[in-house]
């Protein structure tokens, strides 16, 4: 597998209480990063009601060797 990067994924509109707003995730590219749920693979979809095309994505770093694609490093939740 090629290099992995750290990506900031973020919602910028229609944010409600009890939902994720952003996360830093590990992925090989921008398109894969925007598909990762900030709560991880077992999280409830209603907490991130966003189409991948509506997710703002920015590369913020290079993942350490041994990192796994799909890992959520940090996420931000809007408590209500």
Image (cartoon, grey):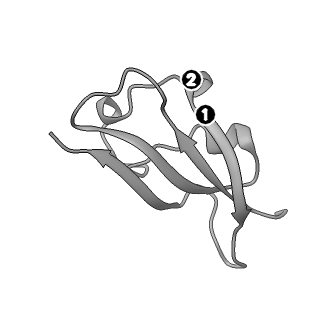
Determine whether 67 is above or below 61 in the image.
below
Residue occupied by mark 1: 56
Are there few (<14), some (14-19), or many (20+) residues within 10 Å of tag 2? few
Is residue 57 something that shows in the picture? yes
Q: Is residue 16 left or right of residue 36?
A: left
The image position of residue 32, as x and y in percent, is: 67, 42
Image quadrant in which you'd find residue 61 = bottom right
**Which image quadrant: the C terminus?**
top left
Which residue is nearer to you in this view: 63 or 16? 16
The residue under the point 44% across, 47% down is 38
Q: Outermost residue toward the right?
A: 2
Residue occupied by mark 2: 54
The image position of residue 6, as x and y in percent, is: 66, 59
Is residue 5 something that shows in the picture? no
The residue under the point 62% across, 66% down is 68
Residue at mark 2 to residue at mark 1: CA–CA distance: 6 Å
Are there few (<14), some (14-19), or many (20+) residues within 10 Å of tag 1? some
Determine whether 46 is above or below 64 in the image.
above
Counting labels gives 2
Which label was assigned to residue 74? none
Secondary structure of residue under mark 2:
helix
Image quadrant in which you'd find residue 18 = top left
Are the residues tagged 2 and 1 within 8 Å (C-beta)?
no
């Amino acid at each position: 597998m090629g290099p992995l990067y750290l990506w900031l994924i973020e919602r910028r509109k229609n944010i409600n209480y009890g939902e994720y707003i952003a996360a830093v995730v590990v992925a090989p590219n921008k398109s894969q990063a925007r598909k990762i749920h900030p709560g991880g693979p077992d999280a409830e979809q209603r907490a991130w009601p966003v189409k991948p095309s509506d997710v703002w994505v920015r590369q913020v770093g290079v993942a350490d060797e041994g990192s796994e694609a799909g890992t959520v490093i940090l996420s931000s939740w809007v408590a209500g």
